[in-house]
Image (spheres, rainbow, N blue to C red):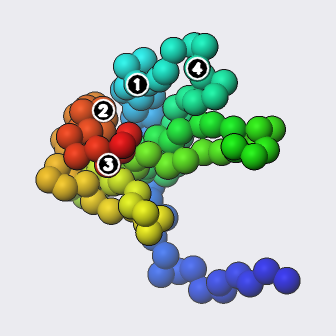
């Protein structure tokens, strides 16, 4: 039997983006993906994907599992979260402890496009190695 928390009133669920905000995010993500995705012939073996969930944009590698090629894996690359109260985007990378950590020295950006440019540049080789 699964255990569920019965008390969720203290948990804050971020407000989702409006339709207009979602379209703006999608446009920025498309521009980022056009720059970063591998060539077409490589994509069955290695590709990039994205997902908007709540106030966050996740960027991840998509690749078949090495020992079971029919199983497709999504390997986290970056997470960018909008903090509405500050009007800022926070940039995170996943360390080997499998937790998201603020990307230093550039942990915040004023726009999603700016945040994705930081991820694209990857000065510290945290996102793409």
- Looking at the image, residue 22 lies above or below residue 12: above
Foreground pick, 115 / 36? 36
Q: Nearer the viewer, mark 3 or mark 1?
A: 3
Instruction: Identify the mark at residue 126; answer none if there is no mark.
Output: 3
Foreground mark, 1 or 4, reads 4
Q: Which mark is residue 77?
A: none
Q: Position of residue 39 (x, y in %)?
A: 51, 15
Q: N-terminal of the two: label 1 or label 2? A: 1
Q: Which residue is mark 1?
A: 36
Q: Are marks 3 and 1 in contact (CB under 8 Å)?
A: no
Location of the C terminus (image quadrant): top left
Q: Residue at x 63, y 28 (%)?
A: 45
Label 3, label 4: how far apart the Cα atoms are: 22 Å
Q: Label 3, label 2: how many angstroms apart (C-alpha)?
A: 11 Å
**Crowding at mark 1 (Cα within 10 Å: few <14, some 14-19, many 20+):** few
Circle 1: element type: helix
* Between 12 and 37, the one nearer to me in the picture: 37
Closer mark to the observer between disc 4 and disc 2: 4
Instruction: Identify residue for label 4.
Output: 42
Rendered view: 30 above or below 67: above
Describe the element under mark 2 as helix, strand or loop. Answer: helix
Where 32 falls versus 128 (above or below)? above
Along the polypeptide, which appears first: circle 3 or circle 4? 4
Which tag, 3 or 2, sits closer to the chain's start? 2
Q: Nearer the viewer, mark 3 or mark 2?
A: 3
In contact (CB < 8 Å): disc 1 and disc 2: yes
- Coordinates of residue 15 in the picture (x, y in percent): 45, 55
């Amino acid at each position: 039997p699964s255990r569920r928390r019965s008390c969720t009133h203290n948990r804050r669920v971020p407000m989702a983006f409006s339709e207009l905000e979602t379209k703006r995010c999608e446009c920025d993500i498309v521009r980022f993906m056009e720059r970063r995705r591998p060539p077409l012939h490589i994509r069955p073996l290695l590709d990039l994907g994205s997902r908007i969930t709540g106030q966050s944009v996740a960027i991840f590698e998509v690749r078949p599992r090495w020992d079971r090629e029919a199983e497709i894996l999504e390997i986290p690359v970056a997470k960018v979260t909008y903090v509405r109260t500050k009007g800022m985007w926070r940039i995170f990378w996943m360390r080997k402890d499998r937790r998201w950590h603020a990307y230093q020295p550039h942990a915040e950006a004023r726009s999603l496009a700016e945040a994705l440019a930081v991820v694209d540049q990857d000065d510290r080789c945290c996102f793409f190695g």
